Image (cartoon, helix red, strand yellow):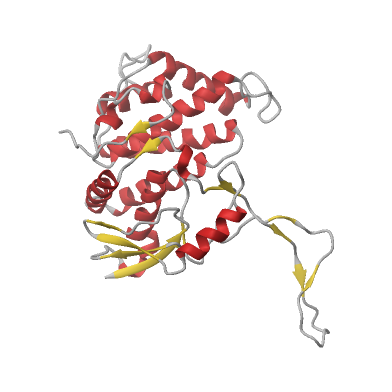
Amino acid sequence: MASESFGFLNCSESISFAGGCLELKESFSDDLDRLNTYAHKDGYIYPPLAEESVKSLEDEEDQWRPVPQTKRPAQMFYLPPSHTLYIENPLDSGNIRHEDAGFLIHLLAYLFETRLQFDGWRFEGRILFDYKRNYLAVDRSARIDFLSLAYEFWKALNKKQRKAITNILFIYGKAKCCEWEWESFMYQYMVFDAIYNFNNERSRFESTEKCNTCGKGGGVTHKERFGKLIEKFGIESSPERVEQIYKTRNELSHEALWCGGSPGLEKKDGESHLLVKCLDRLNSQLIAANLGYCNTYSKSGSWHKLDSSGEWFDAVVTP
């Protein structure tokens, strides 16, 4: 049995799943009260103010002294641990934070649509703390079912594939905490590309478009990648949304344009906001499917319809 503390997960439950369990820390209630007073009303925890300090070798009092005019939001900051993760038979007990435990805490972060980190490791940027506005509705039974089956699926992968999945979960969490739409979209597209590469290395995709010169199939285009993954996992399709996301990706990557203007300088556009949500929700569905969890949610059209403020993450696994 191996264990690691992590946080901060704003969930007052202890959870058992196949292969391990989560137990609340004794300090959970006190830390939760303290963080509730610090959290912003928008539901996020932001970096605290920090300042540089120095210690002179000639200082007899041997004290650190603040450097004037160096106060700024901390680049990195700590949050207290909320739970202890126990793992029965980890694949690599000597490197658990980069293997089993790393996968499991970022998998939990995916379910709660936030970011989590090990005790003693730091965050950068803002962290979602209030889950009331979360898109996914996941009850306890679905949570246990998903954690159990996804962990079993992950353990059967080779080391390179396990690392790829863990990194996908980590960057997905980072994307959801970005403050700028264009930045969130950029990270979400990184996630989508990583999901495609993960699948392509396991089972090579072939392009349906032929080369004008030789008539043979070429490499799969970025636009085709959507169709390949959507078809593979039986997800409800929307060519219109795919075209919009593809066009936005090209403008941002190749022309440094966001909605026809400079990223960060243009007034928020309603359609651009929707496109970020589309890609976010498509990635969410693909992540579930890529962990062997093909439920009603993973196959739904919620990613392109955007006609509801939430979606039920069901525990029924379909063949």
Q: Is residue 306 above or below residue 96?
A: above
Instruction: Give coordinates of residue 217: x percent, y percent.
Output: 31, 19
Q: Nearer the viewer, residue 213 or 24?
A: 24
Residue under the image location 66 percent in, 56 percent down: 48
Q: Is residue 311 above or below residue 78?
A: above
Left of 161 or right of it: where is 44?
Answer: right
Picture quadrant where residue 20 is located: bottom left
Q: Nearer the viewer, residue 140 or 306?
A: 140
- Residue 219 seen in the figure: no
Q: Residue lying furthest left in this view?
A: 319
Q: Nearer the viewer, residue 53 or 35?
A: 35
Picture quadrant where residue 51 is located: bottom right
Left of 189 or right of it: where is 100?
Answer: left
Instruction: Give coordinates of residue 80: x percent, y percent.
Output: 51, 63
Instruction: Give coordinates of residue 181: x percent, y percent.
Output: 58, 31
Q: Is residue 99 above or below residue 239?
A: below
Quarter of the figure that contains the C terminus: top left
Q: Residue lying furthest bottom in this view?
A: 60
Residue under the image location 79 percent in, 59 percent down: 70
- Residue 18 seen in the figure: yes
Instruction: Give coordinates of residue 225: x percent, y percent.
Output: 37, 25
Residue under the image location 45 percent in, 53 percent down: 10
Quarter of the figure that contains the N terminus: bottom left
Q: Is residue 234 above or below residue 115?
A: above
Mark count: 0
Residue under the image location 54 percent in, 42 percent down: 177
